[in-house]
Image (cartoon, rainbow, N blue to C red):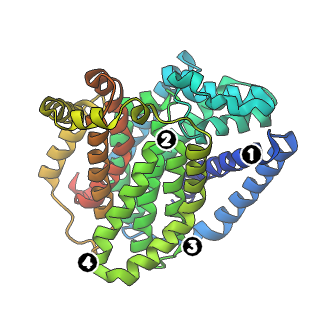
Amino acid sequence: MTLTMSLALLIPLLLGLCSILMFVSLLLFGGISPLFVVAISALCCALAAYVLTRWFPKISWELDRTPPDKTIVTVFIIVSAAALMTFAFMSWRQPNGGWDGWAIWNMRARFIFRSGENWRNSFSPLIDWSHPDYPLLLPLSVVWLWKAAGRETAFAAALIAAIFTVSTVALLYSSIALLRGKTQGLLAGIVILASPFFIQHGTSQYADIPIGFFFLATFALFTFYEKAPNANRWFLVLAGLMAGFSSWTKNEGLLFCLSVAIARWLLIIPRRGLLRIARETALFATGLMVPLGITLYFKFRMAPPNDLINAQGAESLMGHLIQIPRYTLITKEFLKMAIHFTGGAAGVPLLLIYYLLIGQERKTAPSAGAPSALYAIFLMLAGYFLIYLTDPHDLQWHLTTSIDRLFIQLWPTCLFWFFLKVRTIRPAEF
C-alpha cells in the first residue's frame, strides 16, 4: 500500500521538479544541454531512491486493516482493465492528443525544443490564440523526455498523460485505503475509473487531469499530517509543493493556492488558534514558494497578459457584474454540469443516492483535512463562477467549451472528501 502511494506521489513530483529545473536552465543558459538533462535525470533518480527507501516507509500505517471484499476486488479489476483498454485505444487514435493538447501544450513544447536560444518566442503575443501565458509544467516535462530521447516523439506527451491519469487513480485508492480501509479505497477507485470523461480526458493531453492530481495530492497530504500516528511536518511541506505545482500547471492553480490558504485559515484558527495556523502556514509556504515563485516570475516577466483580463476594461467588467441573465445562465450550466460532467452513471447523483442509503461515518476523529477540501472546492467553484461572470468572450460558448474540464479538475478531490465522510461498508454486509 505504501509503495502504491509512494509511486503515485513521487512520479508527478519528479516531473514537476524536472520542469522547474528545465526552466531554470533556459533562463540561465539560454537552452537545455544534453549534459544538463543527464544531471537532472541523475538528481531525480537520487531523490526517488531517497524518498522510496527512507521517507515514505515511515508512513506505513493503516487505520482500518479489514481485508477487502473479494467481490469489490473483482469489480475493481474488471473496471481497471476496461479503463486501461479504453485509454490505450483512445491514445492510439489520437497520439497527439485533443485540440488543446496539440495546439497549446504540445505546440509550446515543440517551440521550446526547436527554437534553441530563441525559446522566448514561444510566448509571443502574436500567437495569443495559443494562450502563451499558460504555465509550463506540461510542455517542459515533454521537452525533458524529448531531450532524453534525442528526438521528438508523440509517445512522450502520451506517457505523461498516462502517468497523471494512473497516478490520480492510484493516489485516490491508496490514500482512502490507508485512512478508511481497502474496501473503501477500492470503491473510490471504481467510481473514478467508471467516470468516462475522466478516462477520455486523460488521453487528451490537456492540463486538467494533471492539475486535478495536484489538487488531490495537496489535501491527501494535509489529511495524512492530521491522521497519521507519527504525523510529520514534511507532509505540510510536500502539500505546499503539490499546491505550488498546480499553479505551474495551469492558471486555475493560482486560484487553488488562494482557496487552500483561506480554507485552512477558516478551519484551523477557530479550532487551534493563530499560533498553530502560523506554524502550519510557514511549513506549507516552504514547499509552496519555489514553484509558485517560478510561476509568478513567468507570469509577470515573460508571459503576455491573460486574454480574460486583457480583453476588457473596468466599464465592461462592471457591466457584466450587473447583468442578471449572466448569473442565471452560469447557475443553470453549473447545476446541469454537476449532474452530467462525468459522462456516465458514476457521478454526483449516484453518490447522493449512495450516501442516503449508507450514511455518514461517525467514528472518525475530528480532522481539518476533509473539511478543508470541501471548503476549497466551494471556493474554487465560486472563483470559476466569478471568472465566467466577468468573461469578455461569448458566455454560452465559453461555458460549453470549458465547464466540464473545470469540474473534472475537482472530481478526484470531491471523491476523496466523499469517501472519507461516507460510512465504510464491511465485507460481511455484501
- Amino acid beneath label 3: Lys
Residue 349 x, y percent position in the rendering: 18, 39
Name the residue beneath numbered marker 4.
Answer: 270
Image marks 1 and 2: residues in contact by CB distance under 8 Å? no
Query: Closer to the observer: label 4 or label 1?
Result: 1
Instruction: Label 4, secondary structure: give it.
Output: helix
- Amino acid beneath label 1: Leu
Instruction: Label 2, secondary structure: give it.
Output: loop
Q: Residue furthest right?
A: 35
Instruction: Label 1, secondary structure: give it.
Output: helix
Quadrant of the rendered image containing residue 309:
top left
- Pick whichever, 279 or 235, lies toward us: 279
Residue 155 x, y percent position in the rendering: 66, 27
Query: Closer to the observer: label 2 or label 3?
Result: 2
Name the residue beneath numbered marker 3.
Answer: 58
Indicate whether 179 appears above or below 114. below
Query: Closer to the observer: label 1 or label 2?
Result: 1
Q: Which mark is residue 250?
A: 2
Q: Earlier in the sequence, mark 1 or mark 3?
A: 1
Q: Earlier in the sequence, mark 2 or mark 4?
A: 2
Image marks 1 and 3: residues in contact by CB distance under 8 Å? no
Q: Residue at image x 50%, y 22%?
A: 129
Q: Residue furthest top?
A: 93
- Distance between mark 3 and mark 4 Cα atoms: 31 Å
- Distance between mark 2 and mark 3 Cα atoms: 32 Å
